[in-house]
Image: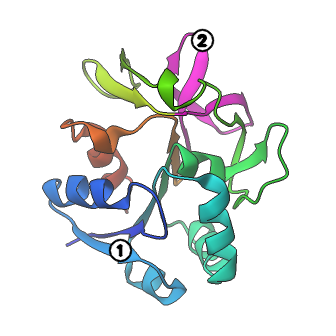
Amino acid sequence: MKTVGVLALQGAFREHKETLQKCGVKVIEVRKKEQLDECDALVIPGGESTTIGKLLNEWSIAQRIRDRAGAGMPIFGTCAGMILLAKQIKNSTQFSLALMDIEVVRNAYGRQVDSFEIDLQVEGLEGPVQGVFIRAPYVEKVGEGVQVLAKHDNKIVMVKQGNLLGCSFHPELTDDLRIHQYFINMIK
């Protein structure tokens, strides 16, 4: 059975855990770097990217995530998680794991009151996917090897680069399991 870790330092980790369990995988809440060794893949949830970044460093988890990503472990970042995967964060010096060759714009869709839901077409998935955008970022630039999987209003909201997957929205807040299943299918 595949084991997927969900980074459980802050943010929407419980919702990801429940969604992944519905997909039929074993799920570990990751709070220590040693727990990453038990995982076949890792989800970095939405939440406060600055807080999660500080905790990744304080608890010495960041380098272990980088090492596992370099060894091919799939990593999926949603919202703040995608910000943490990005090599560049526009107009910000905040910490990131700098794994994915993308530049993101934080809070690009506005404040909490500007949250919205919209149907998106995701490359490789049949039919629309419900996108829940909450203080969401978007991807402004992609490097070589980054595949754009979804856009909203000509803004990039879902990307894949090798074993890395990122999206601006929150698939864990819907009943649709397809994006999580897409991620699980990335496990070799």
Q: How packed is label 1: few (under 14 Cα within 10 Å), some, or many (20 or more)?
A: some
Quarter holding the C terminus is bottom left
Work out whether residue 139 can be spotted.
yes
Q: Nearer the viewer, mark 2 or mark 1?
A: 1
Q: Residue at x 80, y 37 (%)?
A: 90
Which one is in front, 123 or 91?
A: 91
x%, y% of residue 138? 62, 30
Quarter holding the N terminus is bottom left
x%, y% of residue 172? 31, 45
Q: Residue at x 50, y 52 (%)?
A: 47
Magenta span of residues: 135-160
Tell me how far mark 2 sits from mark 1, CA to CA: 35 Å
First in residue order: circle 2 vs circle 1 = 1
| Residues at discs 2 and 1 in contact (Cβ within 8 Å) | no
Give the main secondary structure of the magenta stretch: strand
Q: Residue furthest front?
A: 113
Residue assigned mark 2: 154
Q: Is residue 145 magenta?
A: yes
Q: Is residue 55 magenta?
A: no
Provide the secondary structure element on which disc 1 rests.
strand
Q: Residue at x 38, y 71 (%)?
A: 40
Provide the secondary structure element on which disc 2 rests.
loop
Q: Residue at x 60, y 11 (%)?
A: 154
Which one is in front, 176 or 122?
A: 176
Residue assigned mark 1: 29
x%, y% of residue 142? 71, 33
